[in-house]
Image (tube, grey):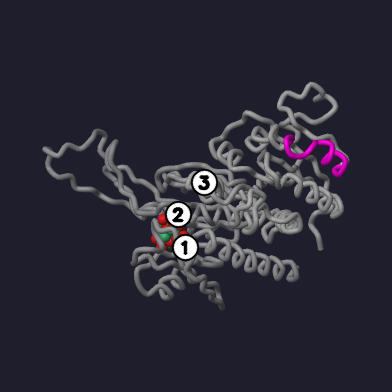
Amino acid sequence: MSALGNKKVLLGITGGIAAYKAAELVRLLIKAGAEVRVVMTESAREFVQPLTYQALSGQPVYTDLFDKHADSAMDHIELARWCDLLLVAPASADFLAKLNAGYADNLLLTLCLASKKPLAVAPAMNQQMFANAATHDNLAALATRGVLIWGPAEGDQACGDIGPGRMLEPEQLLALIDEALAPGPLDGVALLLTAGPTREAIDPVRYLSNRSSGKMGFAVAAAAARAGARVTLISGPVALPTPAGVSRTDVESAREMHDAVMARVGDCDIFVACAAVSDYRIANVAGHKLKKDDAPPVLELELNPDILADVSALAQRPFCVGFAAETRDVEKYALDKLERKNLDLIAANFVGSAGRGFEADDNQLEVYWRGGHARIERGPKAAVAKRLIELIAERYTGRHLSTDSDD
Ligand code: PMT
């Protein structure tokens, strides 16, 4: 069944010959029951007249940032809030570069910056322009920020070239919009998540930490948001952009992470502990920078609070998911943590070799729950996180269904 009935799609059109295909997309969306508003850039208007989209959508077409007739239509902030999804199709190389750089010098770019709704782009350009490293870098950067990249397809181009760069067909874009707007398995669920390392001060300039980059936790946050969850991410110090639709709080030490989690856990349904939290902190933190001509310092360690164990011990506890980073006997230690920390599910990763686990772009997970196990095969952390979220959603929904039927 289509998810498009009464959904609001804002369609941005940039300059390219594929602008004529966008007219068919508008027609298909309207037929499927969606409301469509069209925004055109100046160069898009060189290819197709706004009147075409106005006739098909039954709505005025928006073209100017400073619309003199704004009282008869919505202003850009209203439009950005109005839609359920913003799709730019066709998206030219120039538009993608400006979007990546954060430009807001026309109405469509301004809307993209001002909207918190899912943003998708359907690139369309000459195959050589698509192959250019600048275009690739722009698309890769947009994807890490959660922008959905749909296409391009390969084939004959209007300029006579053959290769990748054709905009996807209207029917393909319709199917992708339908999928993006379909309710996710975690719709309406509040998910709290920790990610990254913690830092424990030794003196004002030095600290104790670990190799966690935050990539795995951020990928889980992005996948959960895509699955429809309201995601709150508590992150240790990392150099990563916040995934689209995720609300983020940065902390430094394990005690700060503990406080941030405890302040928010009452409002969450699922807690995922992906952070590599320092088990110990320095008891005798130096007030001033330690000098190497002083006697070598003796660092006294004391135990940090165990965030995950404290959450799972709460009387009103969320569904608790832990991670286990192991260098040997992965299954034995993971099952031990599942029991000892009273978890609903644990995702164990082998961190003893390069290429997966800490810092790497790939991972592989062994996921355990009471009475069950699933392996998530090695792959990019985004793909691994997507599968993990599916497993979490299955277990979480199953637990709730059985609790409901017990009542
Ligand atoms: O960040 P990346 O570079 O992408 O690497 C990802 C990762 C390897 C860090 C990640 O996949 C992972 O395994 N995270 C958990 C690492 C860890 O600290 O494991 P642990 O076995 O020490 O802890 C078990 C669980 O207790 C974890 O869920 C941890 O978040 C939690 N914990 C641990 C100690 C503590 N004081 N508080 C906690 O909440």
Left or right for 2, reference 363: right
Looking at the picture, tell me which residue is in the foreground, 85 or 98.
98
At 35% from the left edge and 72% from the top edge, which residue is drawn? Answer: 328
Residue extending farthest to the top is: 68
Q: Mark 1: is the Cβ under 8 angstroms from ligand 1?
A: yes
Q: Is label 3's Cβ within 8 Å of ligand 1?
A: no
Label number found at residue 356: none
Horizontal side of residue 353 vs 42, given as left or right: left
- Per the image, the residue denoted by label 1 is 323
Mark before the other along the chain sequence, 2 or 1: 2
Label 3 element class: helix
Residue placed furthest toward the bottom: 371
Magenta span: 45-57
Ligand 1 has an atom within 8 Å of the beta carbon of the residue at disc 2: yes
> In this figure, which residue is indicated by the disc labeled 3?
141
Chain-order first, disc 2 or disc 3? 3
Are the residues at dot 2 and dot 3 in contact (C-beta closer than 8 Å)? no
Image x and y of residue 40, in percent = 73, 36
Mark 1 or mark 3, which is nearer to you?
A: 3
Dot 1 or dot 3, earlier in sequence: 3
Q: Amino acid at mark 1?
A: Phe
Q: CA distance from mark 2 to mark 3?
A: 24 Å
Q: Mark 2 sits on what residue? A: 275
- Quadrant of the rendered image holding ligand 1: bottom left
The amino acid type found where label 3 is placed reads Ala
Q: Nearer the viewer, residue 150 or 230?
A: 150
